[in-house]
Amino acid sequence: MDGSISSTHSLPKRIEVIKSDRSHSHSDTLPLPTKEGSDSELFGVRTSASHDTSNNKEDGASEDLNDIRRFSFLTRRVVRAVGWGVGAAGILAWWICTIVLRPPGYGWVAQTVIAWFALLLIASSFVPVSVSIKKWTPSGSFVRHWDGCRQAWFRIPYLARLAFGWLVVVGVFMGLVFGFRSDLQSPSSARAVPLLGVFTFQLLFCVTSENRSKIPWSTVVLGLFLQQIIAMFVLKTLAGFDIFDWIITVVVDFFNSGVNAKIFLLDQDTVNKQWFIVNVTAAVLFFMATVELLYYLGVMQWVLKKLGWVFFTIMNISGAEAVVAAASPIVGQGDAPCLVKPYMNLMTRSELHLVLTAGYSTVSGTFMILYISLGVPAQNLITSAVMSVPAVIAVSKMRCPETEEPITMGGVVVNRGEQKDAPQNIIHAFVKGATFGLYIVGQIIANTLVFLSLLSLVNSLLTWIGIGFSIHQLTLQLIFGYVFYPLAFLIGIPRDELLPVARLLATKFVANELLAYTELQALMKTDAALSPRAYTITTYALCGFANLSSLAVTGVVAALAPSRAKTATKIAPSALLCGFLTTMQTAAIAAMLI
């Protein structure tokens, strides 16, 4: 009896605790409806008046707090809508003015694409794409027809689909070689040689594949096809030329933004001398600071995720592979793997091979700015970087096919992991990027100095040895120049210029592409300058990090994925050669169009 009474009297206190917890747990949502006097009796048990008063006060405070939060939420939505509306109106006004006035330095194709792309992004922030497709197409007919076409396509036997794909690729190649008008600088016979080179590279990758039965031929065909389409779009269409010309103008203007800073720190005469160390410092520091700022704002992650989604969807690779492949031409071989840091330890052998190959096959935005400062045409560098992305996927999957199930096969991920000293605001992010850029500048200068010295030492030793055989100019460039002589021929270099270009390829492979570009620009100022065709092809062929010194970048992968360090070390030489030949393949395809 006493136990029942005591338990009955303790019940209201427990009820109050439960109600208090519920009121706090629902503070972030709409308040629950209450009835007056409902607290006076619960489960047949009457509570005291003091409890009623305190509960009413709590309910009133909770309602006031919810009203404030609801008002704040609505205010933010209104401000956001007004801000985006003003931005959209400004973009539309800018587009109309540039179309009507046609100011110098503006191409109508480029700003039309940019303006309407930005407007679509703003619209998608209010209306999801899936809802838009269902609403703006009759009963979602677009999606229904697209799914129907996909299902019909995959009902065709695999071998028949593969044969059709190869016929399309070969047909496009033939169109590149024989479909455009010939001239003295670029006859059809000269454009046919790089076609032979491309198929030689494919045969080499297939023969040396780790598992030929597992080669994803659909990915290979799509990679070759996309590489050709990008080349034709940029080099043979007005729209492609205008868009990339605008991109190049932006890049050059970005580089020139540091001129005033250089003049402030030094003087006009020193800046006009175009010293290497001055150009490197200004370009790299500003670029790295800007990249870190874009990371802080979330812009870089968004761009990389969208680019990765394209390759993930089209080429049937894992999400981690897609992000690294898309990011390599922007952030470089050292930083691209950091974007998928939490997944590096779980990568398969094929994924690691593609990650390394993607880094070797192209250059980063930092070095692209540097080479532009040396006088290398920006269009060639940017086009080469973009063309190499689908090619590196095809090449890597031929050489090292996937035999396991990647953990990120289900979607695209961009995750840099936990950062030490993460930026707290925009200024902190910009300063942090500049500090990291200073470290990169130090690496560039130190490595350039060391490798130039080492190359000079080895060449002096070889020359001393060669004198005994009456060979007075025996150098590494001469030796590898003859080794790469057939390679220079296969990418379309004119026959009377094969040896100097082969020596430049040797410099790129033995030392690095920076020294090769420096030698190329110096060669163009002499009487032995290359022809315009040979010069353009060479600028494409040198645009990659595939050199012996870059093998040290394997340490980045080992640091991010200690459990995969042994595998990464084993496949690094294979990835290096694949990256080198991918760049050569890009140059060969460009040679068919110039």
Image (cartoon, rainbow, N blue to C red):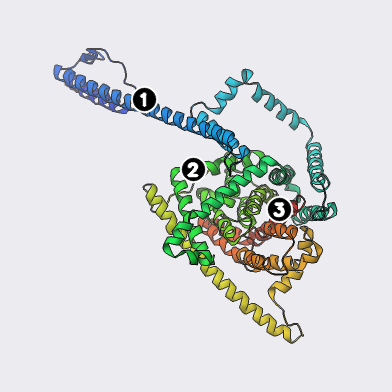
Q: Which comes before the other along the chain, label 2 or label 1?
A: 1
Q: Is residue 327 above or below residue 550?
A: above
User: What is the residue that sits farthest to the bottom in this orientation?
Assistant: 468
Q: Nearer the viewer, residue 423 or 505?
A: 505
Could you tell me residue 284's position as x and y percent? Answer: 50, 58
Q: CA distance from mark 1 to mark 3?
A: 53 Å
- Viewer can see residue 315: no
**For the point 76% across and 70% down, which residue is it?**
482
Q: Nearer the viewer, residue 383 or 142?
A: 383
Residue wearing tag 3: 586
Residue wearing tag 1: 74
Could you tell me residue 414's position as x and y percent? Answer: 52, 44
Q: Is residue 330 left or right of residue 422?
A: right
Q: Which comes before the other along the chain, label 2 or label 3?
A: 2
Residue 48 figure quarter: top left
Q: Is residue 450 left or right of residue 232?
A: left
Q: Which mark is residue 299?
A: 2
Q: Nearer the viewer, residue 178 or 413?
A: 178
